Image: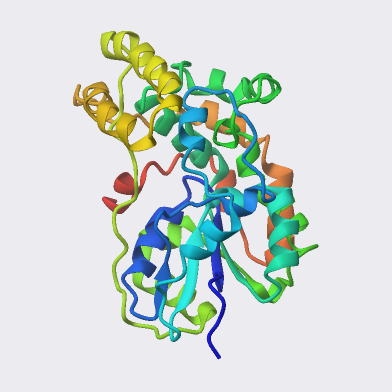
Amino acid sequence: MRRGPRPDFLIIGAPKAGTTALHAALTQHPDAFLTRPKEPKFWLCDDAPPPHWSGPGDRHSQQEWIWRSQQYAALFAEARDDQVRGESTPFYLWSRGAHRRIGEALPDVRLIAVVRDPVDRAYSNWMHLWSDGLEPEPTFRRAFDLQDERVARGWAPFWRYRELGMYGEQLEHLLQHVPAEQVLVMRYRDLVDEPGAAVDRACRFLGIREGLVSQIPRDNARSYAEPGWRTRTLGPVVRAGAALAQFVPPEHWRRASAPLVARLGSGGAHRPLLDPDERAELIKTYSADIALLSRLTGEDFHDWLSPVSRGSFDQRAAR
């Protein structure tokens, strides 16, 4: 029997934890079909348009959300019957509503959650938005502490630097809607340190052949935009352009903004590691949640309690 056009698996999170890299690796596998676009965000919605988020660039990016059922089903229409079908939206791990919708509509679905040291993840999240010119706050710690104020102002989930790293709470809620045997928790460090083995682990979980993908493409890290005249001058231009871009097709602004974003990161500065004292202070936010994640998965995440930052994908891979 032909299967309906729907996913067999979802890569559900977390943002800035390697979901793009795993998606790109599985795209190379002949037994897997992954959607374009990578992040349709369908299960964040409820057959209705997404909320009217109001952070810098939020309304522009929301034009790319796929919330209509027929449009979502069409993403899988070209998959062969012998392929497992999947998509990757890293906010599904965070979204309580997505847990319920996925559990109800896709009772047999397999879910892969890629998690990363929560402080490093938050720093990478801020770095991404800062280097794109969207983040107006040049200090990571200050931006981290602004989360509640930004949530109250209606900014989109990607701005929740602290909350997106609460994997224990998120997994605990997810397991109320999806059986534990249908959920695979993977670590970002394994994608960096042992890419072939990490992909094979995902393949075993999905029931497809192992040993066919040995490398994981470089992740989507941005060139660092050092605070200075570029960010003071070009940052406001990018944010103003992103606000106006809600009124035009998304591809127009992406093309127009590319030279500006490239200019922001053209100073040749190296991405700084997070200060150990600052990291040690921030890790207190996550210590109880890390313990919960360890209990739920049976894995040891004590290395996340270290005051030493591990850096970006490229910095880690170079060690």
Is residue 228 depicted above or below 291 in this figure?
A: above
The residue at the point 30 percent across, 23 percent down is 225
Q: Is residue 216 left or right of residue 128?
A: left
Q: Who is closer to the viewer here, 3 or 209? A: 3
Residue that appears at 68% across and 62% down = 102
Residue located 53% across and 64% down the image: 73
**Nearer-the-camera pick, 67 or 306:** 67
Q: Is residue 271 visible?
A: no
Image location of residue 38, percent across then percent down: 43, 55
Q: Is residue 263 left or right of residue 125?
A: left
Residue 142 at what x, y percent from top left? 55, 18
Position of residue 221 measured from the top left corner of the image (x, y, whole percent): 34, 41
Residue 173 found in image quarter: bottom right
Q: Residue furthest right?
A: 176
Left or right: where 222 falls relative to 181 = left
User: Quadrant location of the N terminus?
Assistant: bottom right
Query: Foreground residue, 168 or 3?
Result: 3
